[in-house]
Every structure is written in C-alpha cells, then in structure tokens.
Amino acid sequence: MDSGSPARADAQRRRSELSSRAGIAEGVGPVSVPRTAGSHKVVLATYSSYDAAQHAVDVLARH
C-alpha cells in the first residue's frame, strides 16, 4: 500500500478524530488545563539537580 492510498488516508483521519475527541493534539500528548480555582496551585516541573529543585522550593516558600 503506498502512502497516498485511500485506506491510509482514512486511517489517518480516524486517528485524528479519535485524538481530537480525547483532547490530544497529534504528536503532543494529552492537553492539560491548569486548575487555578481554590486556595492553592500545584506546580510540576523537572529539575536538573537537587540544588535547582531546592532553589525552587525556597522561592515558593517565600511567597
């Protein structure tokens, strides 16, 4: 089956529709919506070292 076949195009269209229904952009992954209601906010991040993570904790603790 070549890349321009109707079956391949149909399969791609179905994947795109399913991704849209699930709130997933192609090649991006799940779409997240920030939850800012309430008295707190959650911050998720990845740090390259313990010192960088500790600095972030210290900054957040001051606020």
Image (tube, rainbow, N blue to C red):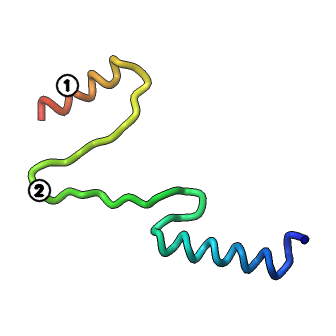
Residue displayed at 44% across by 24% down: 48
Please tell me whether mark 2 sits on a helix, a strand or a loop: loop
Q: Quadrant of residue 16?
A: bottom right
Going by the numbered disc 2, the residue's amino acid type is Gly
| Residue 55 higher or lower than 37, as above or below | above
Q: Which of 15 and 58 is in front in this view?
A: 15
Instruction: Decide which of tag 1 and tag 2 comes sooner along the chain.
Output: 2
| Residue 7 higher or lower than 60, as above or below | below
Name the residue carrying label 2.
38
Residue displayed at 33% across by 17% down: 51
Residue displayed at 9% across by 51% down: 39
Going by the numbered disc 1, the residue's amino acid type is Asp
- Report crowding for label 2: few under 14, some 14 to 19, many 20 or more residues within 10 A (C-alpha): few
Q: Which of 55 and 20 is in front in this view?
A: 20
Residue at the extreme right of the image, as rendered: 2
Name the residue carrying label 1.
58
